[in-house]
Image (spheres, rainbow, N blue to C red):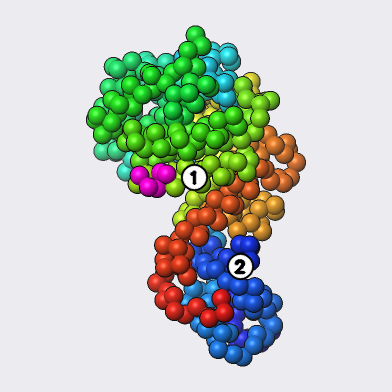
Amino acid sequence: MDATAPQVTAELFAIPLGESWMVYAPLREAAFVANSATVVRIADLRAGRAIPDDEDSARLLELLRELGIVDGGPEVPPITSFQGDPRPTSCTLFLTTGCNLRCTYCYASAGDTPLRSMPLEVAQRGIDFILANALELGADSIEVNYHGGGEPSLNWRTLTGSWEYASGLANSHGLLLRSAMATNAVLPPEKAEWMMSHLDGVSVSFDGVPEVHDKHRLTVSGQGSWDAVCRTLRAFDERDFNYGLRLTATADMLSRLPESIAYICETFQAAKIQVEPVYQLGRWKNEPSAETLEFLTVYRQAQAIAASHGRELYFSGARLGVLTNHFCGVTQDSFCLTADGSVSGCYEVFLESNPLAKTFIYGQAQKSGEMTFDLPVLNQLRQQSVDQRPYCSGCFAKWSCGGDCYHKALDVNGTQEFEGTDRCHIIRELTKDQILDRISGSGGLVWSGADVEPQLLPRGM
């Protein structure tokens, strides 16, 4: 290859858009829409073949150089890795497997599994561990969050006691404490008041209009929980408390997602709204999937409604603007304590009896206060980042998706090599939407993290 010839220096994808193409360089954060002739010229450049010596080729090369796609120097993939014993400064406490709801689609089957409630001393062991790490690493804060397996507020003594303990330790060492919680928001007013006074924010499970929410989010007695959740959300809004909403989309209620998003935007103040197709886990294990083309259709409609109200609607796997080789904490030494003091890397594995416990539980908080770790298990989790998945290597969304949920991948593919899930198509389509939105917002011709003049586009593109 001629060393003086133009060199393609970016990982590059040509994504079909009907009769045109989207050319996307994820690590350059650059994209533009092109015709087939331009894509062929770019393919020739990548292969080291000569391209026509004409005005369009000259303008194309000028654009590609501006974007760093040609002669732009080496790219540095966003790869971080971990080794040795984990040293987290954040912990998530699984306070209880008990729940005041019996949601039909609960991935945890909360309330049906053996009751486990975390003693305060177990929470304190986890807090002591992250504090010691923070001091050793010179961090300026620690983080204590509450999640998973059930409704955290039902273990009220450990919730409030662990927060007070962490707050006291942080203050005594000049550190900031950050704390948040996932909740179903079926709460008495005094508990909602405590959350607003002590936590930095909460994520609330809420499915929108009454008929949709109450179809699947039922109390222990089989009644709808919509009224109780709305009462809590109104209290949050009155105090301008920081909260987000998480909607679960089931196949039977997909058509009503836009209606639910419109209702939320018109009624509550949540700035961020997460929508996920129901997980076929727990009580929904044998129920219909919502990871379908219909989900894409209604999600796009709902997203337009949210945008018209100045709200952000998002899906966890489509996050343009993020460059990473990780989807979540599973591959980043996530430190989650179960009620019995085991250390799990996954929010969805909170019981030692879980069939995937041997995959995700990698440590134990000993009564002595010592943390012990099973490094082979932890290292296996660390190896699930997207850069280590052959299936993902040719995907244009890989550096923003990060490889998606490992737990779900195991549920779909078992222990075999990852071969994709229905979520992969959703992620690619919604990421493509986001790229096109960036192009449109940049004048409709070129999107780039750097300033690129759109008049550089070849006429034939």
Quadrant of res 197? top left
In the image as oriented, which residue stretches furthest toward the left? 239
Query: The N terminus is located in which quarter?
Result: bottom right
Q: Report the residue at 60% width, 72% height from top.
A: 35
> Quick check: 333 above or below 457?
above
Distance CA(mark 2)–CA(mark 1): 24 Å
Closest to the observer, 351 or 252: 252
Q: Earlier in the sequence, mark 2 or mark 1?
A: 2
> Quick check: 164 above or below 137?
above
Residue 451 appears at what percent x and percent y?
Answer: 40, 72
In this figure, which residue is indicated by the disc labeled 2?
20
Q: Amino acid at mark 2?
A: Ser
Q: Report the residue at 33% width, 23% height from top.
A: 232
- Total of numbered circles in the picture? 2
Q: Can residue 391 be seen?
A: yes
Quadrant of res 372? top right
Closest to the observer, 54 or 93: 54
In the image as oriented, which residue stretches furthest toward the bottom? 53
Helix, strand or loop: magenta stretch? helix
Query: The C terminus is located in which quarter?
Result: bottom right
Residue 187 appears at what percent x and percent y?
Answer: 36, 18
Circle 2 packing at 10 Å, graded few (<14), some (14-19), many (20+), is some
In the image as oriented, which residue stretches furthest toward the right? 416
In the image as oriented, which residue stretches furthest toward the top? 221
Q: Report the residue at 32% width, 30% height from top.
A: 199
Q: Which region of the structure is painted magenta?
A: 305-309
Quadrant of res 421? top right
Q: Which mark is residue 178?
A: none
Residue 7 appears at what percent x and percent y?
Answer: 60, 79
Q: Amino acid at mark 1?
A: Gln
In this figure, which residue is indicated by the disc labeled 1?
301
Magenta-colored stretch includes residue 12: no
